[in-house]
């Protein structure tokens, strides 16, 4: 059995008993589940950030909210605490299936979130429909997560088509026309390659693309990177996740491809504490897609999460923390609106309700057409590491123009 953790975060019994209707005793804690990568080949660092965010969410529900129900949204069920159950999917489809099954059948989780790898989430999604237990994507972005219209699957994260649109706009703004892409052989990597090719074919991106798919378990990408170096592209798109993302940066630096040729990473791993430890000076000049910047305005929930994260983990909160926290609180709001811990009722509440997360008071999951089904998207921005050991809050925003705080800085 994979790594399995159950965390119970409870406040004093008086809080639970005092918030319920007269004569009602405190109910047993309700399990909420997180299914996320905590070991290789998955991005274990991302999984740990997601777990930290979930822990903050449980803390918020049990303390600030005083638990579930207890008169909120007109629900007169007794105030009820929640506990967190965590499963490691290692970013592997088979482990995601087994982990989701354990969360629901053994831990009796009434909702699950935490997905980071798209392949893992897509593998477990049919089980969510089978069990009729809501499953929220925290960072899995491939279009099929919502495009396939699973009845119990929701996403409060970016869609790959939005990611491609962002880097397409950035490429055109920079005047680049010759693009190389190194993408891992996962649903995520393949989808981004195909979406970029489709944009070029439709005449919406004036560029050529040389795309190479690599095995995500590979430890040597120098042959592909040397090939790119010989072709002299204007930009290299780094579509690795976890270890491969770092490997591409390091080996591109070693062969003299980067930073001489600009590189854009497909997600926000450079904001993590380990980025400079892993890459040192080789990490300078990398541009990357993100969904949050410390200068962005947050809701009261987001401000609470950022402050508590700093107190609890002695570090600056990043998107993975905040979005996992947001998913936890969205689930709690849906349960209060439904006045129920029945997963089917939670699904119905998610579809019809309006929620607040860390950055928006207008989160909805409509039964819409195409990829908009059960979808809410955060902002999409492009940042750049312009100097060594740079802090998150000083990282310039390069794109979109409406949020721009700096321009692309080439190495000196």
Image (cartoon, rainbow, N blue to C red):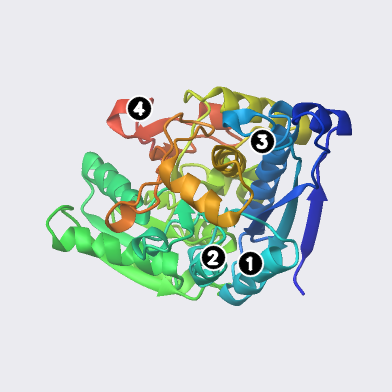
Q: Earlier in the sequence, mark 3 or mark 2?
A: 3
- Where residue 60 appears, as percent x and y from the top left, is 70, 33
Kindly identify the residue that appears in the image at 56 percent across and 73 percent down. 93
- Where residue 80 appears, as percent x and y from the top left, is 75, 39
Q: Earlier in the sequence, mark 1 or mark 4?
A: 1
Q: CA distance from mark 3 to mark 1?
A: 26 Å
Q: Residues within 10 Å of mark 1 (few under 14, many from 20)?
A: many
Q: Are marks 3 and 2 in contact (CB under 8 Å)?
A: no
| Rendering quarter of residue 406 | top left
Locate the C terminus by quadrant: top left
Q: Residues within 10 Å of mark 2 (few under 14, many from 20)?
A: many
- Dot 2 corresponds to which residue? 128
Q: CA distance from mark 3 to mark 2?
A: 24 Å
Kindly identify the residue that appears in the image at 34 percent across and 52 percent down. 367
- Dot 4 corresponds to which residue? 403
Q: CA distance from mark 1 to mark 4?
A: 38 Å
Q: Residues within 10 Å of mark 4 (few under 14, many from 20)?
A: few
Q: Is residue 346 left or right of residue 1?
A: left
- Dot 1 corresponds to which residue? 100
Front position among marks 3 and 1 = 3
Q: Residues within 10 Å of mark 3 (few under 14, many from 20)?
A: many
Q: Secondary structure at mark 3?
A: loop
- Where residue 70 appears, as percent x and y from the top left, is 70, 32
Q: CA distance from mark 4 to mark 3?
A: 39 Å
Q: Earlier in the sequence, mark 1 or mark 2?
A: 1
| Res. 396 mark | none
Q: Are marks 3 and 1 in contact (CB under 8 Å)?
A: no
Front position among marks 3 and 2 = 3
| Res. 69 mark | 3
Front position among marks 4 and 3 = 3
């Amino acid at each position: 059995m994979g790594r399995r953790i159950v965390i119970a975060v409870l406040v004093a019994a008086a809080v639970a008993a005092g918030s319920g209707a007269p004569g009602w005793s405190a109910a047993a804690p309700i399990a909420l589940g997180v299914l996320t990568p905590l070991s290789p080949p998955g991005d274990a660092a991302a999984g740990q950030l997601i777990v930290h965010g979930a822990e903050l969410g449980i803390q918020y529900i049990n303390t600030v909210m005083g638990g579930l129900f207890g008169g909120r949204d007109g629900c007169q069920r007794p105030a009820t605490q929640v506990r967190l159950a965590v499963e490691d999917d290692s970013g592997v489809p088979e482990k995601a299936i087994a982990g989701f099954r354990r969360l629901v059948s053994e831990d009796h989780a009434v909702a699950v979130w935490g997905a980071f790898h798209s392949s893992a989430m897509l593998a477990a999604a049919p089980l969510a429909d089978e069990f009729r237990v809501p499953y929220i994507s925290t960072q899995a972005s491939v279009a099929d997560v919502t495009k396939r219209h699973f009845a119990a699957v929701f996403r409060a994260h970016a869609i790959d088509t939005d990611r491609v649109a962002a880097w397409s706009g950035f490429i055109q703004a920079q005047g680049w026309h010759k693009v190389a892409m190194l993408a891992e052989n996962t649903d995520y990597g393949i989808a981004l390659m195909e979406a970029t090719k489709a944009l070029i074919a439709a005449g919406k991106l004036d560029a050529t693309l040389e795309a190479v798919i690599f095995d995500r378990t590979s430890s040597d990408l120098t042959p592909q990177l040397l090939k790119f170096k010989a072709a002299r592209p204007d930009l290299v798109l780094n579509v690795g996740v976890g270890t491969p993302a770092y490997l591409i940066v390091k080996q591109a630096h070693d062969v003299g491809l980067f930073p001489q040729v600009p590189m854009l990473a497909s997600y926000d791993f450079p904001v993590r504490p380990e980025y400079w430890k892993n890459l040192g000076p080789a990490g300078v000049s990398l541009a990357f897609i993100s969904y949050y910047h410390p200068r962005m305005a947050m809701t009261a929930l987001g401000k609470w999460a950022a402050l508590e994260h700093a107190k609890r983990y002695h570090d600056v909160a990043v998107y993975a923390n905040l979005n996992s926290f947001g998913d936890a609180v969205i689930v709690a709001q849906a349960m209060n609106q439904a006045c129920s811990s029945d997963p089917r009722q939670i699904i119905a509440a998610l579809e019809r309700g309006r929620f607040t997360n860390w950055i928006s008071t207008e989160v909805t999951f409509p039964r819409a057409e195409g990829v908009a089904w059960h979808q809410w998207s955060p902002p999409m921005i492009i940042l750049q590491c312009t100097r060594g050991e740079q802090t998150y809050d000083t990282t310039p925003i390069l794109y979109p123009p409406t949020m721009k705080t700096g321009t692309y800085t080439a190495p000196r």
